[in-house]
Amino acid sequence: MAECVTLLPDVVAQYNATVCGGAEQGDEPQFPVYVRVLVTLTCSVILTVGIVGNVLVPLVIWRNRELRNSTNFFLLNLSLADLCVLLLCMPQVLVEVHTRPEVWVLGKTICEYRAAHPGPSPWALGTTF
């Protein structure tokens, strides 16, 4: 928690100095409204379709005995992993788009998780495809 609290003002100050041309401490950058609306709609569609699809995969495999083979168990694990990524990453994106950069509203646990896992690695994404 201490790292998140101490590093966050430095990141915001650096962002203000480089992107905003040396803006003062009170002038925090914010996304334009059209960007926030577009990101919210896109994330909402991805979140809805992803949750519905990834919940249906285990249900279909569980209800049909013929589908219980090693290939479908691999797909089951993949859908559960994708569901975890959707539920952990998408809400963070939505909150970060709609709040000021120096404010962290998601709590200590998510802050520590985010510091340890800043995003999905290209290696992990490449191996799932």
Image (cartoon, rainbow, N blue to C red):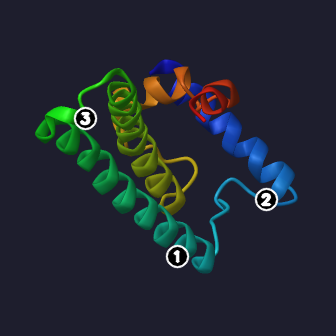
Residue plotted at (18% across, 43% down)? 59
Residue plotted at (42% across, 38% down)? 82
Q: Residue furthest left?
A: 63
Q: Is residue 4 left or right of residue 14?
A: left
Mark 3 or 2, closer to the camera: 3
81 vs 94, nearest the viewer: 81
Q: Quadrant of residue 115?
A: top right
Instruction: Determine the secondary structure under disc 3.
Output: helix
Q: Which mark is residue 37?
A: 1
**Which class describes the residues within 10 Å of circle 1: few (<14), some (14-19), or many (20+)?**
some
Residue plotted at (72% across, 44% down)? 13
Q: Position of residue 81 (x, y in %)?
A: 39, 31
Q: Is residue 76 left or right of residue 39?
A: left
Residue plotted at (20% across, 34% down)? 66
Mark 2 or 1, closer to the camera: 1
Instruction: Determine the secondary structure under disc 1.
Output: helix
Q: Is residue 114 left or right of residue 82?
A: right
Question: What's the distance in space between the residues labelled 3 and 2, CA to CA?
Answer: 59 Å
Mark 2, residue position: 23
Mark 3, residue position: 67
